[in-house]
Image: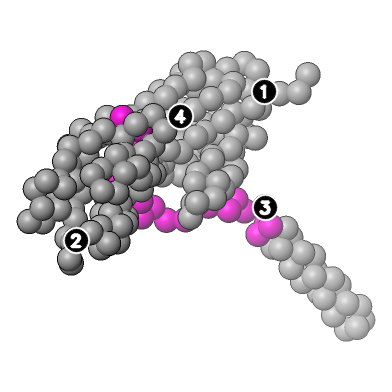
Amino acid sequence: MNNVLRSKFGIGLFALFIFALSACSNKPVAPPPQSSGVLDEYRIGVGDSLRINVWRNAELSSDVPVRPDGMISLPLIGDIKAASRTTEELASELTEALTTYVRNPQVTVIVTNPSSSDFQRRVRITGAVQSPQSMPYREGMTVLDLVLMAGGPNEFASANKAKLYRRVDGEVKVYPIYLRDLIEKGQVQTNYPLQPSDIVTVPERAF
């Protein structure tokens, strides 16, 4: 009798273990924690205006626009890529390029008109929502905020198959959003905090 009880007890523990593993495997993979560095770092874009200062070399200092091809033109150096770089990265490259012509050059780069920043700091929602949106990012925004601003899922939405697309370390990552569970059941596990350039998509149901 004791052997039978032990056997049943063992089977029960095994079943509980399998259930726990299953529950863990269904847990959504959350995006990495929000980093203030991601929000603070500005990358130069097409249409921006830059002030290039070369210390003690006024003739080499200039105000330049970033052309549609992402390049700027400077005395002695000629064309150099500016788009998608931070001011520190561009200043470092300009300093290196000028060492051929100037002794110990010191270069600073200032974005005087960040006209591309509006598009860099936007969040977007597309697909089966009432009103697809592209809007400026605001500190503290979450997936639910963005969905509500878009009027919520429409009647064709497969809401629990929604996705968050985010660029992480130069690579686009995809995270599941259980939107129906979030809206109807208050399950907030996938109500991720948003970051600039995030995209939320809500697919349609297959008919």
Q: Which residue type carries mark 1?
A: Glu
Q: In the rendering, which numbered label is found on residue 204? A: 1
For the residues bearing labels 1 and 4, Cβ distance under 8 angstroms: no
Q: Residue at x 38, y 44 (%)?
A: 81
- Tell me the number on the disc at residue 124: 4
Q: Which residues are magenta?
A: 23-47
Q: Earlier in the sequence, mark 2 or mark 3?
A: 3
Spatial CA span between label 3 and label 4: 27 Å
> Gap in Å between the C-alphas at discs 1 and 2?
60 Å
Residue occupying image coordinates x 49% and y 27%: 125
| Residue 79 location, quadrant | top left
Q: Does 32 lie within the magenta span?
A: yes
Q: Nearer the viewer, mark 1 or mark 2?
A: 2
Q: Which residue is mark 3?
A: 26
* Label 2 element class: loop
Query: Closer to the camera, 86 or 39?
Result: 86
Of callouts 3 and 4, which one flags the residue occurring earlier in the amino acid sequence?
A: 3
**Three-letter amino acid code at disc 3?**
Asn
- Label 3 or label 4, whichever lies nearer to me, is 4
Q: Is 104 located above or below residue 176 in the figure?
A: below
Query: Which residue in the structure is indicated by mark 2?
Result: 102
Q: Looking at numbered disc 4 in the image, what kind of residue is underneath it?
A: Arg
Q: For marks 1 and 4, give the one nearer the viewer.
A: 4
